[in-house]
Image: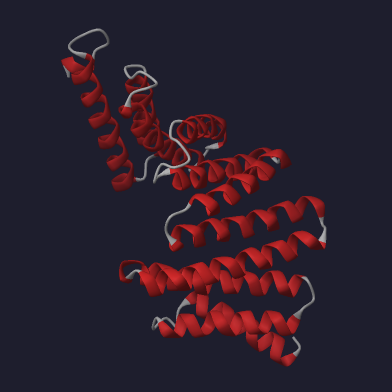
């Protein structure tokens, strides 16, 4: 395509062509699962980025797409070398909008995900501490209960990841509390928005299961049993009592009830 050649044609046409190309590559990855398609999408986004002034609306709009592609590539096979680039772009994405922007919370969540992934590769506790802070910001800035629930769930996961470094019980306490907050926000989302009900109830069930696991590690079997029972009730409410997750919860309930 002539419009894709550097220095050829109007910048607006080149930008539109590059964004189209990036999205085609991403769709190809969704179809075929080949990580190279994500690399080609990321390259197209990088070329498009050079055509946009920092104060343009298109600049703020492009960054989340580019960051998501890089994050997905970092999660795929041999993804370690892409993790820092993903964090850089996602950090830029977060800075491109005001805190009052409706999408600000989502950008915080994605940056936190990038930092957690880089920690999984590099093991730097600083990444987890920044992710923890960003998720607390995301909770405050979220406009929808389901988004707030997802932020609290991730916050709970980060507490457990930090606990793997510190081995202090307070991190498990914080994890259990974050999962409880996620559960409450998810139930609120299920009540308030019919479009969110399915996702909200699945999240509510999952975070109660995670809360039960944290409470077990704190040697609080009665509280863990209550959490697992709440999770199972939520799976049953959705007609998923025979699913894999419900089966795992049922096994933990049986183990706690029988002292196993």
Q: Could you tell me if residue 237 is visible in this image?
A: yes
Residue in the picture at 50% in, 50% down: 141
Residue 125 picture location, percent across and down: 73, 42
Give 25 or 19, whichever is nearer the viewer: 19
Give the left or right position of residue 198, taking residue 88 as reference: left
Residue 231 picture location, percent across and down: 54, 79
Residue in the picture at 57% in, 47% down: 137
Give 221 or 29, whichever is nearer the viewer: 221
- Give the mark count: 0
Q: Quadrant of the N terminus?
A: top left
Tell me where residue 124 sits by quadrant. Answer: top right
Q: State whether residue 104 is above or below residue 14.
A: below
Give the left or right position of residue 188, taking residue 84 as reference: left
Give 249 or 176, whichever is nearer the viewer: 176
| Color encoding of the figure | secondary structure
Residue in the picture at 32% in, 22% down: 48
Which residue is the extreme one toward the bottom?
258
Which residue is the extreme one toward the top?
7
Q: State whether residue 140 is above or below residue 53.
A: below
Residue in the picture at 57% in, 31% down: 84
């Amino acid at each position: 395509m002539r419009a894709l050649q550097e220095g050829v044609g109007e910048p607006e046409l080149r930008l539109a062509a590059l964004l189209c190309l990036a999205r085609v590559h991403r769709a190809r990855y969704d179809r075929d699962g080949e990580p190279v398609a994500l690399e080609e999408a990321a390259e197209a986004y990088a070329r498009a980025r050079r055509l946009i002034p920092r104060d343009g609306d298109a600049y703020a709009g492009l960054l989340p797409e580019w960051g998501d592609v890089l994050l997905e590539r970092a999660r795929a096979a041999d993804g370690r070398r892409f993790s820092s680039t993903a964090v850089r772009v996602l950090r830029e994405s977060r800075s491109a909008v005001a805190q009052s922007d409706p999408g600000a919370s989502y950008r915080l969540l994605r940056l936190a995900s990038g930092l957690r992934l880089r920690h999984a590769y590099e093991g730097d506790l600083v990444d987890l501490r920044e992710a923890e802070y960003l998720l607390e910001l995301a909770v405050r800035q979220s406009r929808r209960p389901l988004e707030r629930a997802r932020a609290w769930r991730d916050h709970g996961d980060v507490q457990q990841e930090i606990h793997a470094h510190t081995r202090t019980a307070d991190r498990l306490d914080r994890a259990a509390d974050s999962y409880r907050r996620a559960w409450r926000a998810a139930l609120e989302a299920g009540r308030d928005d019919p479009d969110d009900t399915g996702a909200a109830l699945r999240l509510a069930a999952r975070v109660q299961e995670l809360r039960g696991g944290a409470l077990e590690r704190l040697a609080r079997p009665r509280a863990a049993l209550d959490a697992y029972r709440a999770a199972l009730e939520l799976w049953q409410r959705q007609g998923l009592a025979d699913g894999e997750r419900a089966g795992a919860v049922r096994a933990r309930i049986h183990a706690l009830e029988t002292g196993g």
